[in-house]
Amino acid sequence: DTEVTQTPKHLVMGMTNKKSLKCEQHMGHRAMYWYKQKAKKPPELMFVYSYEKLSINESVPSRFSPECPNSSLLNLHLHALQPEDSALYLCASSQEGAGGLTPYEQYFGPGTRLTVT
Amino acid sequence: QQPVQSPQAVILREGEDAVINCSSSKALYSVHWYRQKHGEAPVFLMILLKGGEQKGHDKISASFNEKKQQSSLYLTASQLSYSGTYFCGTEIITGGGNKLTFGTGTQLKVEL
């Protein structure tokens, strides 16, 4: 199984709402990632989890809060978002974790398309 | 800093060849190539490590020149299924993990 699943597929939320995005993989991968992608732009790295610990935060505003409950699950909690946060949020996973010298391909989920009104 | 890709967009007739270039201002450890079709997730194509090796499968191959900090993706005898946006990804290893920075992207459209 080489699939990364994400739920929900679409999400519309107001600026005062609290919502969560969910990502799951069952490939035994030890690194998981959150990316943000705006239309016609490349994915931008937000967070990296390695062996269930947050290892990289790309200076993401605190209204985005990641969580890794176990090695297969990754959540992104959203609170008080702004309209400019509307984007496609992609989750990815790869075999190796922090500091590995062997680069591994990243497997991406289909994404959650988020609209903030 | 984000790698720069060229061209930004290209239209091909089926069967034609194309080259997509990726250039970085930073020293590279490895280069990834991904293709993203409209409305879908990026899909991994290949990784190249330092050493200038060329990799490929089927009719898609790539090269990596770490001295020039450049990589090129070669698409031979293009098929309709090759249409999509191609991203290179340059990887650096930090104490916290491996960071992948995607390039500016190249939109490829293959027509009959």
Image (spheres, coloured by chain):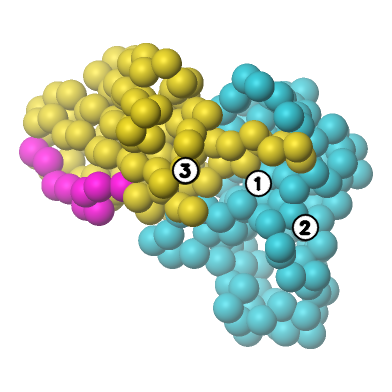
Chain colours: A cyan, B yellow
For the point 49% across and 64% down, the residue is A38
Quadrant for residue B112, please give it: top left
Which numbered tag is attached to residue A91? 1
Vertical placement of residue B79 versus A88, above or below: above
Give the answer, above or below, for where A73 lies relative to B44: below
Rounded to the nearest angstrom, the CA distance separating label 3 from label 2 is 30 Å
Judge whether residue B9 is colored magenta: yes
The answer to whether residue A108 of the structure is visible from this angle is: no
Residue B105 rendering spot, x and y as whole percentages: 35, 50
Q: Which residue does the numbered mark 3 point to in the structure image?
A: B26
Q: Could you say which disc has been placed on residue A76 in the image?
A: 2
Q: Quadrant of residue B98?
A: top right
Q: Amino acid at mark 3?
A: Lys
Say if residue B77 shows up in the picture.
Answer: yes
- For badge 1, the amino acid type reads Cys
Q: Secondary structure at mark 3?
A: loop
Region rendered in magenta: B5-13
C-alpha span from label 1 to label 2: 10 Å
Parent chain of label 3: B
Q: Earlier in the sequence, mark 1 or mark 2?
A: 2
Rendered residue at 48%/21% (across/down): B49
- Residue plotted at (72% across, 51% down): A47
Q: Are marks 1 and 3 on the same chain?
A: no
Mark 1 and mark 3: Cα distance apart in space: 26 Å
